[in-house]
């Protein structure tokens, strides 16, 4: 990586970090290829992009869950980076067996932040993964914006909610102590849960996923949430539109009246 590249990425990482730290909720619509990145980044008010591992894997015919070869995932992420001037954070799943090296590869294609799943592994192992990713960023000369994900809610099963919440808080606290700037808690998170997380970690430390029935965005901002993203749901919306168009055409219809060329 050249000195100029390092300076540029360092500036982008600081920009991305500032967007998380600001009191205004960072709204990130996940993308999966060059055209989705370009279309989303052209919308006024969009300040950063995030990839979705599920969406990239699906675009190449793979199931989510680190089934896509890491080289292909990194190549796809690099394609997103090349399509925008905005800072890009990548979904790196659980690190593909080597979180630090995977983060280094992502940085090498221009990524300045990432999600990293803990998959409810032993806490010491999960903390070590967080530390490895942050160390990779420091080695490349940037403050990598790690969105340390705990799967406490998505893997809750039938456990009492209070126990699940306590696990999520404990794990998030450990990741923040290890240097992660924010903690991602995907799943069905209620307003009361958000209050508990913000009480435990402080404002602008929690990131969430938007889904049907989620706490409204304005309320998330009021409560001190740092960021909301949409994972694979944005791709599902795009594919729904394509399928609906196809259904209409098969039935004898045509392009919608508000059709416009975006590519």
Image (cartoon, rainbow, N blue to C red):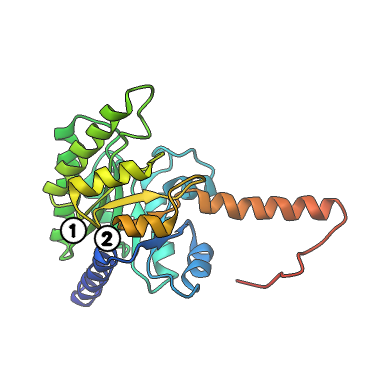
* Count of numbered badges drawn on the protein: 2
Is disc 1 placed on a helix, strand or loop? helix
Q: Is residue 156 above or below residue 118?
A: above
Left or right side of 220 for 168:
left
Q: Position of residue 1 (x, y in %)?
A: 22, 68
Q: Position of residue 80 (x, y in %)?
A: 43, 63
Q: Is residue 31 above or below residue 119?
A: below
> Would you say residue 140 is visible in this rendering?
yes
Q: Is residue 16 left or right of residue 246?
A: left
Assess disc 1: are there few (<14), some (14-19) or many (≥20) residues with their C-alpha within 10 Å of its C-alpha: many
Write the residue at 26% across / 27% down.
163
Observer-nearest of 219 and 46: 219
Residue 50 sits above or below residue 257 on the image: above
- Write down the residue under mark 2: 107
Residue 66 placement: quadrant: top left
Q: CA distance from mark 1 to mark 2?
A: 7 Å
Q: Using residue 167 as the reference point, say whether residue 85 is left or right of it.
A: right
Image location (x, y in percent) of residue 255: 77, 64
Left or right, 17 with respect to 242, comes to left
Q: Which residue is mark 1?
A: 137
Q: Earlier in the sequence, mark 1 or mark 2?
A: 2
Residue 263 lies in what quarter of the image?
Answer: bottom right
Residue drawn 50% across the image and 72% down it: 43
Cβ atoms under marks 1 and 2 closer than 8 Å:
yes
């Amino acid at each position: 990586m050249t000195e100029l590249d390092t300076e540029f990425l360092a500036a982008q990482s600081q920009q991305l970090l500032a967007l998380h730290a600001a009191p205004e909720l960072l709204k990130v619509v996940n993308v999966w290829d060059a055209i989705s990145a370009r279309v989303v980044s052209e919308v006024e008010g969009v300040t950063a992009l995030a990839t979705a591992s599920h969406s990239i894997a699906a675009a190449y015919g793979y199931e989510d869950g680190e089934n896509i070869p890491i080289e292909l995932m990194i190549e796809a992420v690099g394609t997103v980076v090349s399509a925008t001037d905005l800072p890009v954070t990548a979904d790196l799943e659980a690190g593909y067996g080597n979180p630090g090296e995977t983060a280094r590869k992502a940085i090498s294609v221009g990524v300045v932040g990432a999600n990293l799943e803990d998959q409810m592994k032993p806490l010491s192992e999960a903390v070590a993964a967080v530390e490895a990713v942050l160390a990779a960023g420091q080695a490349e000369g940037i403050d990598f914006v790690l969105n340390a994900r705990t799967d406490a809610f998505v893997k809750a099963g039938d456990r009492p909610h209070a126990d699940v919440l306590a696990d999520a808080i404990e794990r998030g606290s450990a990741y923040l102590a290890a240097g992660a700037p924010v903690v991602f808690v995907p799943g069905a998170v209620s307003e009361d849960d958000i209050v508990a997380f913000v009480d435990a970690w402080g404002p602008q430390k929690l990131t969430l996923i938007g889904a049907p029935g989620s706490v409204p965005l304005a309320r998330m901002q009021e409560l001190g949430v740092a960021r909301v993203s949409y994972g694979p749901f944005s791709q599902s919306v795009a594919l729904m539109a394509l399928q609906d168009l196809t259904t209409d055409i098969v039935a004898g219809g045509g392009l919608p009246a508000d059709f416009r060329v975006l590519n």
